[in-house]
Amino acid sequence: MTKRSSEAHMVIGYGVLIFYLHDSRSLKAKRSVVKAIVGQIRNHFNASVAEVGAQDVHQRAEIGFALAGSDHRLINTKMDKLVNFAEDLGLAQMIDTETEIVHM
């Protein structure tokens, strides 16, 4: 691995959004909601987004996301906006979030 100058660095913000799907009675119904949430976040924030856990639980969705850039403050702001956006979609009740920022 080549050592880069102290000027160049990458900031990665990532997290998991955990939702409770009140009206989901089947995995098919859950997939519809998860697909909508993932698509909306992906399109609005140009982020990597995927269901990352609880795939076999029809009333719980765990959706992971990642953003990359060079400015810590910008990534932090985008993550806050992403979390608020996902909650404001109103497609499911957000019950927990975990986020982290790392510098490379």
Image: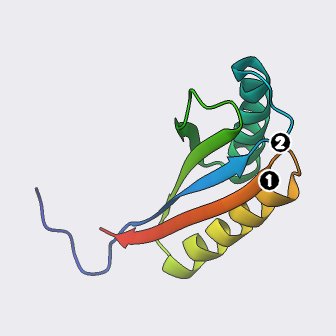
Which image quarter holds the N terminus? bottom left
Q: Is residue 64 above or below residue 23?
A: below
Residue at x-position 79% and y-position 23% = 29
Name the residue that disc number 1 marks.
93
Residue at x-position 70% and y-position 63% = 83
From the top left corner, tell me how far across and down residue 88 is, in percent: 86, 59
Name the residue that disc number 2 marks.
22
Residue at x-position 65% and y-position 48% = 46
Q: Is residue 69 above or below residue 18?
A: below
At label 1, the amino acid type is: Gln
Q: Secondary structure at mark 1?
A: strand
Which image quarter holds the C terminus? bottom left
Residue at the extreme top: 28
Distance Cα–Cα, label 2 vs label 1: 8 Å
Q: Answer with the quarter of the image where residue 81 lies.
A: bottom right
Q: Mark 1 packing: few (<14 Cα in 10 Å), some, or many (20+)?
A: some
Q: Mark 2 packing: few (<14 Cα in 10 Å), some, or many (20+)?
A: few
Q: Secondary structure at mark 2?
A: loop
Q: Which of pointers 2 and 1 lies earlier in the amino acid sequence?
A: 2
Q: Is residue 4 left or right of residue 44?
A: left
At label 2, the amino acid type is: His
Residues at badges 2 and 1 in contact (C-beta under 8 Å)? yes
From the top left corner, tell me how far across and down residue 38 is, in percent: 69, 39
Residue in the foreground of this view, choosing between 59 and 97: 59
Q: Is residue 58 above or below residue 22?
A: above
Residue at x-position 56% and y-position 81% = 73
Q: Is residue 45 left or right of residue 33?
A: left
From the top left corner, tell me how far across and down residue 27 is, in percent: 70, 21
